[in-house]
Image: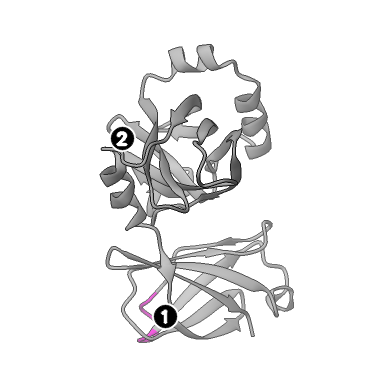
Amino acid sequence: MDRRIFISTLMSLPFSATARAALPWKAEFVVGGFDGKTYAAGFRVIMDKDWKTYWRNPGTAGIPPHIEITGGNLASVTIDFPLPKRIIEESGEALGYHDEVIFPLTLKPIDATKPVAAHLSSFFGICAVVCTPAKFEADGKFALDNPQQFLITKWQMRVPQPAQFITATHLVDKFLVLELNQPIIDLFVEGPDNLYFRAPDFSKEAGKAWIKVERLKDTKDLLGIDLRITADANGQGLEQHVVVA
């Protein structure tokens, strides 16, 4: 299904109808504690066996999650995405999560001395062989301490952290070549929307990753472009921005 059509379909579905149809999953607005400056929260999705949902860059055919937080006394909201897995299937490559995921949320109040009550609304794709549109809404009330904080902390630790693991970039034909300074088991590249970066090939040269760039017409189109690259360093998530030279 075309991604834009899928998103439009999700947005038009009534909450009650979606909830009745969403048998392969359940969701929760997880509310954490307050550190004096910000409140911690999370959007939790639990899936049945063999079902998945997607990362912010969903792969060749997936749908990224859309999460919105509204409410009084809110200055800003930050949404984080834990390190995904690459899922190879008949329809292509998907980047996402099996079983369970929590997308950590950080809510900054306008006035830290006043309480925060927030409303979460979301729509996302839940997929096995076929995709099911999913929509979830919930309210959350925050306190100084909350027993669910440990769940949020667990998934906050899986959010990729800034690091310098790429030492150089090159373009060879329609391949992006990255020189690495440490062992990496997978790389997820985010760049122009019209391009897709395939799974890396580490076998050609030691310390280098060769990544095929789909739909790249001319290598000059990538020169000077900032790429956001996430690495799986044996389960540890790393993130670095590079400019293609």
Q: What secondary structure is found at the residue carrying circle 2? A: loop
Assign a secondary structure to mark 1.
Answer: loop
| Front one among 75 and 121 | 75
Q: Residue at x 33, y 32 (%)?
A: 47
Q: Residue at x 52, y 12 (%)?
A: 17
Depth order, front residue of 81/128: 81
Q: Main secondary structure of the magenta part?
A: loop
Magenta residues?
202-207
* Residue 159, x across and y down, in percent: 39, 58
Question: Measured along the vertical axis of the image, is residue 135 above or below residue 188?
Answer: above
Where 203 sits versus 69, above or below? below
Determine whether, in the image, residue 62 is placed left or right of residue 144.
Answer: right
Frontmost residue, 120 versus 163: 120
- Amino acid on which the number 1 mark rests in the picture: Phe
Q: Nearer the viewer, mark 2 or mark 1?
A: 1
Judge whether residue 162 can be spotted in this image: yes
Which residue matches tag 2?
A: 50
Question: Quadrant location of residue 8?
Answer: top right
Graded by Cα atoms within 10 Å as few (under 14), some (14 to 19) or many (20 or more), the crowding at tag 1 reads: many
Q: Position of residue 15 (x, y in %)?
A: 54, 17
**Residue 42 vertical position relative to residue 5 in the rendered view, above or below:** below
Label 2 CA crowd tier, 10 Å (few <14, some 14–19, many 20+): few
Find residue 195 and report its horizontal and vertical position in percent: 64, 60
- The residue where tag 1 is placed is 165
Height in image: 83 above or below 179? above
Among the two numbered marks 2 and 1 on one chain, the one whose residue lies closer to the N terminus: 2
